[in-house]
Image: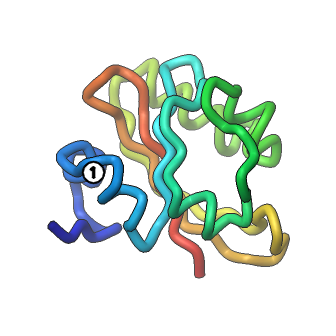
Amino acid sequence: MTVSYDEPHLARAVENLSPAMIDQLPFGAIRLSRDGLVEYYSAAERRLAGFGSRSALGRDFFSGIAPCMDNPQYRGRIEGALSDGTLDLRFYHTGDFEDRTRELEVRVQASAAGGYWIFMRRG
């Protein structure tokens, strides 16, 4: 099963895949709990971001992994959409672990389990 990053219901499509299939996607996938703790961090995201073998599970995504997104423009929009029950965002960000000039397209959608997914496609 192939899943396109531009799939309108990307989170639902990814949730129908096995973890091994998610790890093979051409874009990164991270599932967070409602309070921002990492529940799943795909092998594809590790590889594409240059995150390496560092531990991600259970860490606060915004303070421990992506502090560059811990601001009103990113985290604030996500938390606002979560509160409103309308979490389906797309935004752009510049900077990655190994390449601070790399362009990222970020999609955030609600997870069926109650948290949310962050998907990242690199330019």
Outermost residue toward the bottom in this view: 123
| Residue 64 point in image, percent of width and height | 79, 34
- Figure quadrant of the C terminus: bottom right
Q: Which residue is mark 1?
A: 14
| Residue 50: quarter of image | bottom right
Instruction: Characterize the local packing of mark 1: few (<14), some (14-19) or many (20 or more) Cα atoms within 10 angstroms.
Output: many
Query: Looking at the image, which residue is at 54% across and 35% down?
Result: 78
Q: In which quadrant will I find the N terminus?
A: bottom left
Occupied quadrant, residue 76 = top right
Residue name at image x 49 percent, y 20 percent: 34
Horizontal side of 26 relative to 36 (left or right) equals: left
Query: Which amino acid type is marked by label 1?
Result: Val
Left-right relation of 59 to 10: right
Which element type, helix, strand or loop, lies under badge 1? Answer: helix
Foreground pick, 98 / 70: 98
Front position in the image: 39 or 19? 19
Q: Establish if 15 lies above or below 9.
A: above
Disc count in the image?
Answer: 1
For residue 109, which quarter of the picture? top left
Name the residue rendered at 61%, 70% in the picture.
48
Residue 69: image location, x then y, percent: 73, 45
Q: Position of residue 95 (x, y in %)?
A: 78, 66
Image vertical order of residue 37 relative to residue 13, above or below: above
| Colouring method of the image | rainbow
- State the residue at coordinates (70%, 27%): 60
